[in-house]
Image: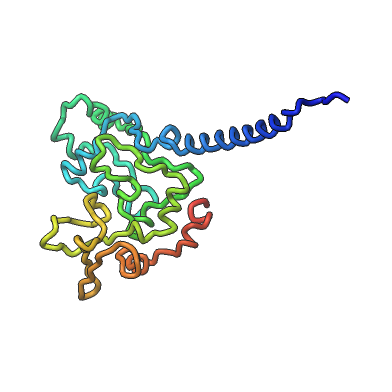
Amino acid sequence: MAQTFHRSANSIAKASILGGVILVVGLLWAALQLQRSPYFTYAGVARPQPVPFPHQHHVAGLGIDCRYCHTSVEVSGFAGIPPTKTCMNCHSQIWTTAPMLEPVRESYRTGRSLSWTRANDLPDFVYFDHSIHINKGVGCDVCHGHVDRMPLMYNQASLQMEWCLDCHRAPEKNLRPHFVKQDPKSPPTMGDQLFNMAYEEPSPTQPVTIREGDRDKTFTSQTGPDGLGTYLVKVNNVRSPQDITSCNTCHR
């Protein structure tokens, strides 16, 4: 009786199945990488705005504190978008005829708010409270990046769940004190360290000293049993990683 299939049919079938599996896995991997790419997350991409507001100039150049514009960041879930009047506090006196500021002046004259595009925009099903993070010791640049180096604002991270969980699993890595005792040998740092873009975590060559009651406490590391972050987890009553990585912490 003649053979129905060629003797190589089994090999072809095995190769086809293997090739199909490789193709499916490859497509899934490509889709995952695309979903994490700036094409979807906009990480590192400056979005069009009604006015090209340069954080770099205002923060690093002029030394304006984050809270001057984002007034509710310490007490509310939302940092707050400044009203046009905040801009005009300065720009009614300087750069009064600059063409790029005409939308600001028109907004002030008409009372119509500027329509800003959110750079750090979370989905509606994600709950995020700025005040909780600030009061627990998370500095602005931990999430927003060094805005003092951004000519135009963009989100420096993907803002995806895995990025949030990296911090929630080990919060001590990103906590800092509100105030530090100035080391005469170090460059001067002024004000609340949570809003200080030049803040650096403690190291053996650059320790951080804080005031604890009536005595000083110096740290030379961020993590570990004697680390600053580990200490702040305790004194700021940061919940356990098991609690802050549970689903209902961010999805309510």
User: Horizontal and vertical percent for residue 185?
Assistant: 11, 61
User: Horizontal and vertical percent for residue 218?
Assistant: 22, 69
Q: How many marks?
A: 0
Viewer-nearest residue: 230 or 85: 230
Q: Is residue 193 above or below residue 237?
A: above
Query: Is residue 85 in view?
Result: no
Residue at point 25%, 65% (across, down): 220
User: Which residue ends up furthest to the bottom in the rendered image?
Assistant: 214
Viewer-nearest residue: 106 or 30: 30
Viewer-nearest residue: 20 or 164: 20
User: Which residue ends up furthest to the left in the rendered image?
Assistant: 184
Q: Is residue 179 above or below residue 56?
A: below
Q: Is residue 137 above or below residue 111?
A: below
The chosen color scheme is rainbow
Placement of the N terminus among the 4 image quadrants: top right
User: Horizontal and vertical percent for residue 207?
Assistant: 21, 63
Q: Quadrant of residue 95?
A: top left
Residue at point 35%, 31% (across, down): 47
User: Horizontal and vertical percent for residue 186?
Assistant: 14, 58
Viewer-nearest residue: 3 or 184: 3
Residue at point 46%, 61% (across, down): 241
Horizontal side of 131 relative to 59 (left or right) equals: right
Horizontal side of 119 relative to 200 (left or right) equals: right
Residue at point 21%, 43% (across, down): 59
Horizontal side of 51 relative to 169 (left or right) equals: left
Query: Is residue 58 in view?
Result: yes
Q: Quadrant of residue 174?
A: bottom left
